[in-house]
Amino acid sequence: MNLQDIIKGKKEWRAHMARVKALPQDYQIVYKEIQKYLFKVGPVEMTEGIGLLSGIVDLFEEGAASGKGVLEVTGSDVAAFCDDLIQDSKTYADVYQDSVNRKVYKAIKKDTDKKK
């Protein structure tokens, strides 16, 4: 990643956060919780830009414009809403599970090969 990419990323992030700050307060609160949740759960593509977060802001802007409360948009279980958003995404937990499984398989195969 070069300096220009970093600058572009910062500009995108600032513009994105300006959109978030323009949302009604209840939407901002839920957005921040969703952001924290997604950063912890960690869909791998979150490191490749703000696409998913930007899509959430799009959805929130539409909901706010139509006069809906934020929980009318997300439902009352915000974590489940997040899980639905990333259900087809590879998460860091998936990557870690794959790594553990590979290590276990490799260790067992090595041990089995020794016994032959």
Image: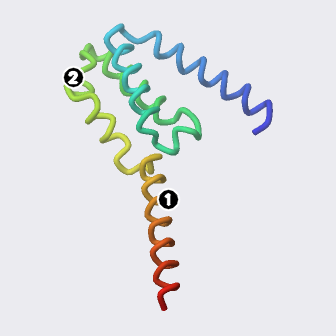
Dot 1 and dot 2 residues touching (CB under 8 Å): no
| Callout 2: SS | helix
6 or 116: nearer the eye?
Answer: 116
User: Which quadrant: the N terminus?
Assistant: top right
At a point 26% along the width and 36% down the height, the residue shown is 80
Decide: is 87 above or below 113.
above
Label 2, on which residue?
Answer: 72
Res 35 → quadrant: top left
At a point 60% along the width and 17% down the height, the residue shown is 14
Task: Check the image and name the residue furthest to the front.
Answer: 115
Select label 1 or label 2 by which is in front: 1
Decide: is 39 above or below 96.
above
Give x and y (percent) for residue 60: 36, 22
The span from disc 1 to disc 2 (Cα, nearest Å) is 39 Å
Task: Identify the mark at residue 99; answer none if there is no mark.
Answer: 1
Give x and y (percent) for residue 115: 47, 87
Task: Identify the mark at residue 77; answer none if there is no mark.
Answer: none
Give x and y (percent) for residue 17: 53, 17
| Callout 1: SS | helix
Give x and y (percent) for residue 55: 44, 32
Q: Say what amino acid the circle numbered 2 marks.
A: Glu
Is 5 placed left or right of 16 in the picture?
right
Q: Say what amino acid the circle numbered 1 marks.
A: Ser
Which numbered disc, 1 or 2, marks the residue that appears first in the sequence?
Answer: 2
At a point 51% along the width and 35% down the height, the residue shown is 51
Task: Check the image and name the residue furthest to the right.
Answer: 3
**Label 1: how many Cα within 10 Å (few below 14, some 14–19, many 20+):** few
